[in-house]
Each structure stands twice: as C-alpha cells, then as structure tokens.
Image (cartoon, grey):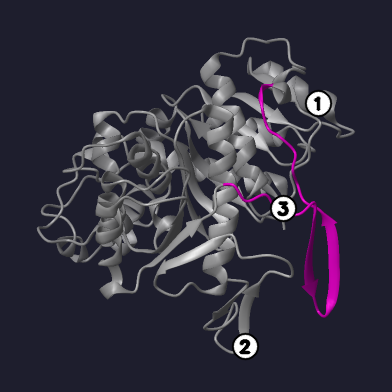
Amino acid sequence: MTELELKYGCNPNQRPAKVFMENGELPLEVLNGRPGYINLLDALNGWQLVKELKEATGLAAATSFKHVSPAGAAIGLPLSETLQKIYFTDGVALTPLAAAYARARGADRMSSFGDFISLSDECDEATALLIKKEVSDGVIAPAYTKEALEILKAKKGGAYCILKIDAQYIPPKTEKKQVFGVTFEQGHNFIKIDDSCLEHIVTKNKALSDDDKRNLILSLIVLKYTQSNSVCFAKDGQAIGIGAGQQSRVHCTRLAASKADNWWLRQSPKVMNLQFVDGIKRADRDNAIDVYIGNEYMDVLADGKWQTVFKEKPEVFTEAEKAEWISKNTNVALGSDAFFPFGDNIDRAHKSGVSVVVQPGGSVRDDLVIKAADDYGMVMCFNGIRLFHH
C-alpha cells in the first residue's frame, strides 16, 4: 500500500487528507479501525521512541503519546505493589511489555487519557488486557498475538485502531514537510543515544550508577521525540514528568517537576488510603486524585460535592505534608533537549529529588549552572547534543 486516505487532517475542516509514500510501500498496515492524521503522527513518533529505547536498554519499551509528544514512556522493569495499585494492573499477570505499558500510561494518567500507544515488541495478551481497561485511540506494534488481537479488536465497539509496523523499515536519509505551501527538507535525526552521551561530567560529583545512566539515556530518547522546548524527569526506568512545548526552559522544568511531584504524591499514604464511592469510573477517580492533591480541593469539593467521589470526606493534604512527602523522592534523573541558560532550572529540579542531570551545555552561564549543581551535590553531564523536535 502506497497511500492511505484519512477522515480529515488535524481538524474536521481540513479535507481531503491522506498519507502516502513517494517511493515504495507504507511501512505500516492497518489491522483494525481507521487511523486519523494525529493518530499517525503519534504512532510514527512513538514507534521510533520505543524502538530506540529497546535498542539502548535491551528491554521491552512502551510509550503513551498525546498530540505528538509522549505523556509517558518506560521500559519493562517489575512494578512494586504500590505502583501496581496506582497503575490499576489488578487481575493481570504482568509480562515485561505489559509492565512497560503500565509504567508509560501510569506516569501521567490525565495526560494519557485517550492516548495512542507504541510498543517495541509483539503485543501479548497481558498488555492487551491493560490496554482494554483504558480510554485509548489506538496502538502500534511490530506484531500481535492472536489473543491480543481479539481483545483489542473488541475495543470502542470494534473501531479501535490497530497498526502493525514493519520493524525492519529504515526511513530515507532526508525528510520533508510543508508549511504554508513551503517545503522544508532536512536530514533525518539518526543520532544514537547511548552511554557515550554521559562521558563528559562537568561537576565535582562524578559518581553515576548504572540505574542513573539508564534513566538519563531514557530521558534523552524521550526528549528526541518530544515537542520542544522540553525536559524529562525519569526514575526507575520510566519518565515521571515531561515538560513539552514551552517557550521558556524554566517553564518546561516547572511543568515536568510538577508532574513528577504529582506522580510521587499519588504514592503517599494520604492518597493511597482514599476511599472512593462504589462504581466510580477510573477517569473520574484520576481527576478526583488530581483535585485532592492540588490546591483546588477545598473549592472544588466543597458544599458536599465530595460525597459524589469519596465515601467519607478526606482530610486536607496540607502543603507542609506534601512538601515532606516530596522530600522523600530521591535518585531522580533530569534530561534537557537544549542547554540550561540559568541555574534556576537546577534549583527547581533539586526540589523534586533530581540528583543527576544531562544537558548539551553551551550556555554563556554554564559556570553558574554547574555551580548550582555542585551546591546540591548533583552529577551533571554535558552531552553536546541538542534534541529539538518539531
């Protein structure tokens, strides 16, 4: 197949719409449903991410994409009992691929609502059972087991989008796109992310553990496919906070840090012990947790509204209590797609448990950024690689 007609482009008024190959066949096959324009942007960017993450780590990888940026990405490390609970994996015997998807989806559940999923390996039954539980637009993988395909085809009344990617496909060396009738051409970003990106350590502390290296590599691969400006917080083989598409780098850092804080706060006893009314939908529960953690709790759930969500009115999660819990989050890695121009990014990252950093370097204020990292005893690598993505 050299051409695939789409319902419409980014918006319903943008018709006609299609994807096609100027030479050769499309490297994907539609097994079920009808992909949209944005679906395919998410699928093709997500597939590249998980393919590279699998190559870099040797472990199954998954990502949850929304609007051409990952909401989460992870490799298939085992989950703690706490993570199994907050990622809603009950009833599923987790395979490495299923664990990767649970982590990718669970990092930022609100942003992942209605995601497009990319999987590095053949989709198995366990992974399909997790996907079945979630609100999702579609999935791309190199293959599917018979059982997995049957489960996925039943989603969305039989309209769930299932794509099969040719895992051996290599894109041309140059790529093109049009904006306002003007054609842009550039070399495809084939740059390889590996341990060599972490060799130039510029801080006094130079102790990087294997886990640190893996988390930093993961953050860089995530950033390679995240709309810029972007930063990524990572821990235990998964992204826990991604700040994408901000004009200011410190706003990227604040956004990603707030998501990382939220991910950690969801594991606190205050949140884990919340008692929800019977039959509450998963998305409503996620929204309620976000409101409870945030400053809106007293306003949004005032005047008896809490009764529609909780069995009993929960105690307020005070700012002091949240700060104390966040202080227990440690060994977090931070990657940036371009240099940090000021030390304020490091100051904010420190508050969310960051201990290791990788960034290109090259700012006129590098010395001040390095000093900020040294003040906190961080390890910081300059990789000399910018990873802008648009």
Calculate the distance from the C-alpha at mark 1 to the C-alpha at mark 2: 52 Å
Residue at 62% over, 39% down: 221
| Image quarter of residue 271 | top left
Calculate the distance from the C-alpha at mark 1 to the C-alpha at mark 3: 27 Å
Q: Which mark is residue 389?
A: 3
- SS label for mark 1: helix
Label 2 neighbour load within 10 Å: few <14, some 14-19, many 20+: few
Q: Is residue 2 above or below residue 375?
A: below
Comparing 128 with 182, the one in front is 128
| Image quarter of residue 376 | top right
The amino acid at mark 1 is Leu
Position of 291 with respect to 50 (left or right) is left
> Which residue range is magenta in the image?
168-195
Mark 1 or mark 2: name the one nearer the start of the chain. Answer: 2
Comparing 286 with 142, the one in front is 142
Q: Which residue is mark 2?
A: 16
Comparing 119 with 332, the one in front is 119
The amino acid at mark 2 is Pro
Label 3 neighbour load within 10 Å: few <14, some 14-19, many 20+: some
- SS label for mark 3: loop
Position of 231 with respect to 89 (left or right) is right
Q: Which residue is mark 1?
A: 368
Calculate the distance from the C-alpha at mark 2 to the C-alpha at mark 3: 26 Å
Tag 1 and tag 3, C-beta contact below 8 Å: no
| Image quarter of residue 267 | top left
Position of 387 with respect to 367 (left or right) is left
Mark 2 or mark 3: name the one nearer the start of the chain. Answer: 2
